[in-house]
Image (cartoon, rainbow, N blue to C red):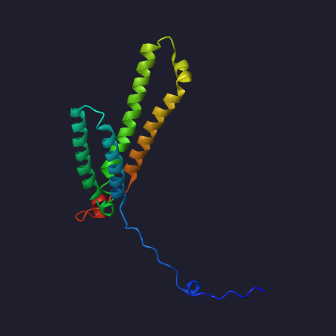
Amino acid sequence: MEPKPKASAQTQSEPIEFAEPPARTPLVLLQATERSLRLKTVEILAPILPEKTATSLTEVSQVAEESLQKLAEIDLDEITDEDLKPARIQVGLAFVGFGALMMVFLLLYLYTLHPEINAADQVKEYWYQYIWFVGLGVAGMFMLGREAMRPRRLTDQETLDDWE
């Protein structure tokens, strides 16, 4: 015969509360992660490098530490959409410029090292590179167009009547 199990005090108690980890911003996490990887790398490389290079590596590591500390102090909640406008424009221009520059390099490469290939064969042979570079340019143009179409925020001095 099996006796019926009795309810113990543990099953009737409230659930156990676990300690919450401290909330850290993404920039602080980036700083901690990069620091641990950088210090391990410096520890491994410093003994095998020449003394002058090892000293330079240590100094650069300290500069990186200071830079990341300044970066970690930035409050991401204070950054507004208007603050990011120049960065979005620069990234769009960089995409357009890089795509155009690489297209010029590709054409220069083809016309100097493969002058026997006509234009149709160039596209047939190097279509993958053409697509990548044109795609980069188009992505940059989309970014610039999106930025140009964003509604402009009015400052305190401006009114809607000034724009009409």
State left or right for residue 38 relative to residue 13. Answer: left
Q: Residue at x 27, y 64 (%)?
A: 159
Q: Which residue is farthest top? A: 116
Q: Tell me residue 157's x, y (percent).
A: 22, 64
Q: Residue furthest right?
A: 1
Q: Nearer the viewer, residue 88 or 19?
A: 19
135 lies above or below 68? above
Which x, y percent locates residue 150?
38, 54
Hey, which residue is sitting farthest front in the picture? 1
Q: Quadrant of residue 103?
A: top left
Position of the C terminus by quadrant: bottom left
Q: Residue at x 47, y 77 (%)?
A: 17
Q: Estimate the x, y position of residue 122 in percent, counting from the top left.
A: 52, 20
Q: Is residue 22 left or right of residue 50?
A: right
Whole-percent x and y of residue 154? Answer: 29, 62
Q: Is residue 49 above or below residue 35?
A: above
